[in-house]
Amino acid sequence: MDGHRADDMIDDNLYKKLMYEEKWFDIRSNISAAEGEVKYSHNVDKKTNRVICNQTIRGSKEIDGKTYKVNKINIYTKEGIETFRRKIDSGKEDDFLMKKTDPKTFNNLMEIYNEYIDYDNPFEEYVKVTGDYPKRYSKKNNGPRIESLRYLDGEVRSALDISHKYGHEKGSKKVFLESLTSYRMDVYYNDNDKQYYLVGIKHASMRFLDGKCAIDDKTYTRILRDEKVIDDTKTVADLEGLGYRYMMSFYENDIIQFEKDGRMYEDRFLSRANLDRRNYIELKPINKDKYERRRFVSLAKTKKIVKVNTDILGNRFYVTQEKFPM
């Protein structure tokens, strides 16, 4: 036995447990304990020299004093027929400009659609069966074939008017660059109705004034009116008299705490979203890149909003009011 007694020997499993398993258990426990003390520091984007919008160019149409975006679909593509079906199924066929400008052609198109409705793409199936394409209405049935349809795609909200680049004079046809990028969100509290009001600022609203990038009073007044903070008879100078107090501003990646339905939440701020609905914001999680889906939250009835500033080490500083950044 090489000089060792049998009772001096230990079982292999016991040896592994003593040498490895217990040590790894201790390491795992230490990691789990450290996780609870992790501090996060995110790069908050306050730069003004960013792309002001995406490069999607849209036409528009004036209806009853409102400006609507005009989009276009190819009725033979998967995306095109899905949009067509969605409009028809939801009773929004009036959104197609052809129904008003060329009702006979649109009726013919709907007859084809209904006849081949059980196929993936009724218009493609019509071409396969007849060897011909749907055409514009004409007495001799020799009108040009139809490939695309224009439709109203919602009211113009956040967009940049570039009509002058296309030779359109003021008050005539408009052309827009849409999806203006978010710069910051200003938070106000009204002492009269005890509510918060969130004001979204776009990069396109910023101007160089006296050597600094800022927002002029006229532009800021328009934004306040769009956000329904003030009516069309008021300006930014009337805010204090109306009971509004500026509280703080949020930029992309700022940490925001807010109360909702009696519970406090904490996330990273992304943008003031959905301008058609008051006080909606888009959020990111604290400790991962993105949610499985984009998260939108309404703070219309929140009772508390707090901004959490962090230094590079992740140490936290809680803010409920700060100086106006204009």
Image: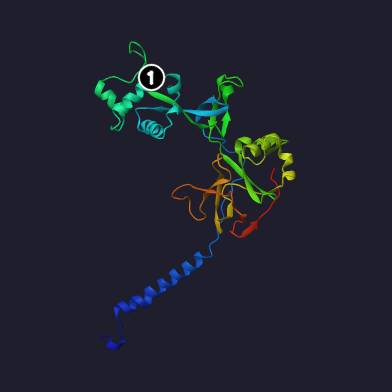
Which residue is situated farthest in the top direction here?
140
Query: Dot 1: what SS?
Result: helix
What is the x, y in percent for residue 234? 71, 37
Locate residue 221: give its quadrant: top right
Front-most of residues 159 and 192: 192
- The quadrant of the image that shows the C terminus is top right
- How packed mark 1 is, by other alpha carbons closer than 10 Å (few <14, some 14-19, many 20 or more), is some
Front-most of residues 20 and 292: 292
On the picture, is 6 further left or further right than 110?
left
Locate residue 149: give its quadrant: top left
Label 1 belongs to which residue? 105
Which residue is depicted at the point 39% across and 18% down? 104
On the picture, is 309 further left or further right than 72?
right
Location of residue 243 with respect to 76 vertically, above or below: below
What is the x, y in percent for residue 66? 56, 28
On the picture, is 90 further left or further right than 40?
left
Q: Do we see residue 108 in this rendering?
A: yes
What is the x, y in percent for residue 162? 57, 26
Q: Do we see residue 3 in this rendering?
A: no
- The quadrant of the image that shows the N terminus is bottom left
Which residue is depicted at the point 65% across and 37% down? 225
Circle 1: residue type: Thr
What is the x, y in percent for residue 3? 28, 88
Which residue is depicted at the point 47% across and 67% down? 32
